[in-house]
Image (spheres, rainbow, N blue to C red):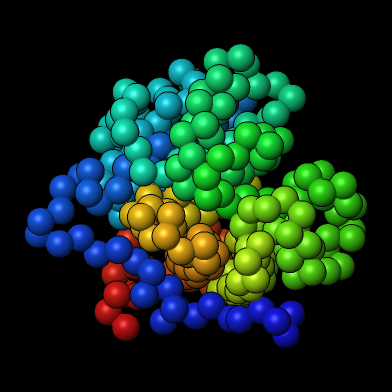
Amino acid sequence: MSSFTPWTPDDAREHIAVPSAADDKYSRGVLGVITGSTDYPGAAVLGVEAALRTGVGMVRYLGAERPADFVLRRRPETVTAPGRVQAWLLGSGMDAATRDSATVARLHDALAEGLPTVIDAGALDLLDRVTGPAIITPHFRELARVVGATTEEIAADPAGWAVRSAEKLGVTVLLKGHDSYVANPDGTRLVASSAPAWLATAGAGDALGGILGALVATHADAVEADGAMLARLAATACVIHGLAAGRAGGGGPFTVLDLAENVSAVITGLLGR
């Protein structure tokens, strides 16, 4: 823990892209999203909602038909046609054991592009196909499966396992929890501690993925140029996520859509600090 640098709201503020009058929807960043499934369509909705409220020029949702229908009902501005993107968000709300062949092909194609990529849940088995800058966002159980440890071992030393996993897997690791630890193979070590205990709820990780995906899409060039940028953006996403949860619940429980709906106000507040 002592080797991890706390990431503060002031740090997060410096990693929020503010558009200029010269920007358009493409220059503001386009996030490609392949998330959700027939069994878990809500994960796609939560991720897209959070991404759009974080500040991105466009979200291209290219997942399965059922979650795409849910996404468009909630956020009709979402684009469902293939095209250029600056970053990818993959895997939230999927089960690797039950993915259909079309979804697998879409995931493989996205990973082959070599763009900055956020990899969650049901795409964690595809790390051998990563060709560009990547960050994984597992909780304890998911990381245990990836690295061959037990959940209890991860829980006993989350900071250490974040470091060991980044070194072993060769990607940036965001290990989610009350304290979220971020480590990359080059030695960056950050911890974000803004999450209230009420944030331990279904769908919270899907929203975090959307926030992080948007930040990566709006900083795609910086991610390509700076190996530590993914770690800083991940910690920033955790700060925004935790502050939005606190604002949504006012110290008590909330729904994840409540959290997503508060993301824009949290970012406004950070920019005004």
Residue 112 rendering spot, x and y as whole percentages: 52, 31
Residue lying at 72% horizontally and 85% vertically, measured from the top left: 2
**Which of the 4 image quadrants contains residue 60?**
top left
Compared across the picture, whether 25 is left or right of 211 comes to left
Q: Nearer the viewer, residue 176 or 232?
A: 232
Q: How many marks?
A: 0
* Residue drawn 59% across the image and 81% down it: 6
Please determine whether, in this image, residue 195 is positioned above or below residue 127. Answer: below
Q: Position of residue 180 (x, y in %)?
A: 64, 67
Mark yes or no: residue 242 visible.
no
Does residue 114 appear in the picture of this structure? yes
In the image shown, does 113 or 94 lie closer to the viewer?
113
Instruction: State the image quarter where residue 73 is shown.
Output: top left
Task: Name which residue lies at 53% across and 34% down.
Answer: 111
Quarter placement of the N terminus? bottom right
Q: Is residue 131 above or below residue 228?
A: above
Q: Where does the C terminus fall, quadrant-wise?
A: bottom left
Q: Residue at x 40, y 23 (%)?
A: 69
State the residue in front, 257 or 36: 36
Q: Position of residue 97 (x, y in %)?
A: 74, 25
Left or right: where 180 falls relative to 162: left
List the single residue furthest toward the top.
101
Instruction: Locate residue 56, reporting x and y percent.
Output: 30, 50
- Seen from the viewer's position, the closer of residues 135 and 145 is 135
